[in-house]
Image (cartoon, rainbow, N blue to C red):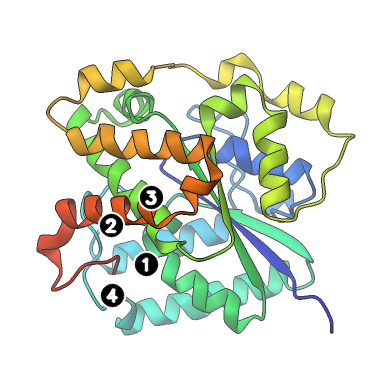
Amino acid sequence: MKKKPKAICILGMHRSGTSTVSRCLNLLGVDLGNKKNLTGSGKANPKGFWEFTQITRTQQKILKILFTSWDRTEPLEENWMKNFRVKNQVKKLKEVVRANFGNSKLWGWKDPRTCLLLPIWERTTRELNMDTSYVIVVRNPLDVAASLAKRNGFLLEKSLRIWALYTLSAFLYTENKERTMITYESLLENWEVPLKNVSTDLSIPWRGDISDSIKEFLSPSLQHNKSSIEDLKQKTTEFPHIFKLYQLIIRAEKDKEFFNSAEFSNNLHELYFQLYGKYFNNDGVK
């Protein structure tokens, strides 16, 4: 039987290191698309965003159709996928993938908005007969907030609320699927260990010839803020769910058995329900 093409979905909150992880996976052989079709570098990301521009623009359009944008702090309304204009954009998304990655055995995409819109991707890759695996990238929410304060002028509370929504959505949407996780901090501290874990978990062949390229790419300039978990605890006393969520994630990164456990899943569902249960008739990501 012919092996299906494999898609790698890189998930994570804005300003969490998803661009850095995307480039590292690209060096491992994951096709991110023709370079001319990738969003170029900018002040916010001097080493590149590593996003396929048509995918990002289509997801921006979908959020606009739903009268929202990337910086929302609560889940999308139930039945958002039934919107006929959304369905039209999903058809376009499918054609973008078919045209640009239809012949790729191993390809991937990164756009943080995917955390909010993942159900459309599950359908898209399934209809294109592709297997999909997920890499969830997490960064200390204090550092995410500091970056958003500088780039967007957001207050701490807003940034933490966005971080919680994106992070919980990424983990809950990918339950019972082939997935792994990586923290931005571990990648910059000792890149080879977490990247090899990603390679093993998602069956991406390891390449021994990429060491110099990754070392050159992972310069200290990529980390402008570096907060500890104690810093987070002290500064989120008014937002205890943020600290609890990050604690769970750090434990899951160090303990694969816990990452795959019902205990981890139940804790995430409980947090999600505490934060967003009022928006729905029942528990779960919609």
Residue highlighted by disc 4:
80
Which mark's residue is nearer the viewer, 3 or 1?
A: 3
- What distance separates the C-alpha of mark 2 from that of mark 1? 26 Å
Percent across and percent down for residue 45 are 53, 31
Residue highlighted by disc 2:
269
Label 3 with label 2: CB-CB less than 8 Å: no
Amino acid type at circle 2 is His
- What distance separates the C-alpha of mark 4 from that of mark 2? 21 Å
Q: Which dot marks residue 264?
A: 3
- The disc, 1 or 4, on the residue closer to the chain's N-terminal end is 1
The outermost residue toward the right is: 209
User: Which residue appears at 50% of the width and 56% of the height?
Assistant: 56
- The disc, 3 or 2, on the residue closer to the chain's N-terminal end is 3
Image-quadrant location for residue 143: top left
Label 1 with label 4: CB-CB less than 8 Å: no
Q: Is residue 145 left or right of residue 190?
A: left
Residue highlighted by disc 1:
62
- What distance separates the C-alpha of mark 3 from that of mark 4? 28 Å
Percent across and percent down for residue 158 are 20, 37
